[in-house]
Amino acid sequence: MQTYIFKIILSFTIVLTFINFQIANAQSTSGKFIVVLDAGHGGDDPGNLGNGHKEKDIALKIVLEVGKSLEKNKDIKVIYTRKTDVFVKLRERAAIANRADADLFVSVHCNSHSSQASGTETFVLGVANTKRNFDIAKKENEVIFLEDDYKKDYKGFDPDAPESLIGLAFQQEDYVEQSIKLARLIEDSFIGKSKRKSRGIKQASLWVLHNTYMPSVLVEVGFLTNNAEGKFLNSKSGQSKMAASILEAINAYKKNLDLNVGDSYVGDVTIEDTISSEVHTIENTVFKIQIAASSNALEPMSYNFKGLNDISREKQDGLYKYYYGYTSDYNKAQKLQIEAKNKGYKDAYIVALKDGKQVKLSEVLKTEAN
């Protein structure tokens, strides 16, 4: 059985690496930032009915409010998986985003539990399933049984079987880190803007996320089964607050991208023209370039990282982080960062380690300047 699962995973990895490469090189040239908003459930699938509230209706109202505000920005194009009370297949929700070459996929849901649990959660795709996360994955994935042709469309996928979930996380490896960044912005906005309790960022094997070729998150805006939270989410005021937080996070995510990637990029950066050749060492400090983060433990070999050598891997907070290079010379670290960016790792950044522990780069450079 383990050998069979390994073969499935290996096949997913090889095929989807090729697919991701094709799609990454076929992005829309319209210049618009495309956001796909997905209101969970709909039609014959009401979602959870905690305290008599309907998840499908609340999710749709929040999504429509987020979309209405985003549409005011001429640089953003909004696409909805549904704008009315209709049933949309899980695989079609992902297909809508892929056909649009979207930049973001945001799916909105409401949570439920047998207790008075409360708080928001934002999920990204991953295999780090706790018992609780597995239960949520089962609940959200079981909607496939409402589809007449689910056996053909989902090819034997069983939401109740843990082994069926293993392969899903390999579908979105290239986007895990960006998905986590968006998830963090959303949860921070729920706390800061809407004053809600946050249960944090979680990883789960959710089908609706597995086949989207872009940063994707599933947002649980709260528990309808909690008496107070259910009442809040079923109110116009509550829905507006949650929509405002999601909107703020999407705008912040886009702003961060705009600051780092502009229209003026015309090719590889010329290292010699930008970085000093002088040696600039900082006492007891070394630098590495973080190029990726993933729930998947890849071998730190050059063939897995676009030909880059000197790759190292560390596990932190349930994710494997991958680094390029290792040097005590900050100027050399800048050159390594540019090399990584030129290889396609556009979000590569320098991390600093002092006495073997990671520290803030800004503090290291500030101390050195003083």
Image (tube, helix red, strand yellow):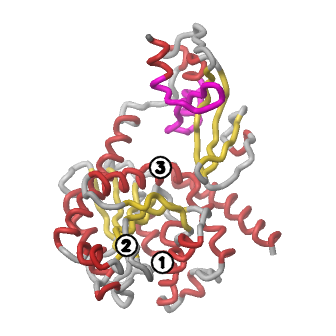
Q: Where is residue 177 shown, x and y percent of the image?
A: 52, 49
Which percent across, then down, holds residue 35?
Answer: 34, 58
Residue at 47% in and 49% down:
178
Q: Is residue 67 visible?
A: no
Whether residue 350 is in magenta: the answer is yes
Secondary structure category for the residue under label 2: strand
Tell me the quarter of the image containing the N terminus.
bottom right
Q: Which residues are magenta?
A: 336-363
Task: Identify which residue, 191 or 72, lies in the foreground.
Answer: 191
SS category of the residue bearing label 1: helix
Check the image and report above or below for 275 versus 243: above
Along the horizontal axis of the image, is 46 left or right of 61? Answer: right
Give the residue pinned by disc 3: 178
Residue 324 coordinates in the image, percent (x, y) = 65, 33
Spatial CA distance of label 1 from label 3 is 22 Å
Mark 2 residue crowding within 10 angstroms, few (<14) / some (14–19) / many (20+): many
Which residue shows up at 37% across the image and 72% down it? 109
Q: Is the residue 181 above or below the residue 260 in the image?
A: below
Mark closer to the chain start, 2 or 1: 2
Displayed quadrant of residue 155: bottom right
Quick one: label 3 or label 2, which is nearer the N terminus?
2
The residue nearer to you, when weighing 227 against 174, is: 227
Q: Circle 1 is placed at which residue position?
A: 140
Task: Identify which amino acid the numbered label 3 is placed on.
Answer: Gln
Q: Amino acid at mark 2?
A: His
Comparing marks 1 and 3, which lies closer to the viewer? 1
Specify whether residue 4 is painted magenta: no
Q: What residue is disc 2 on? A: 109
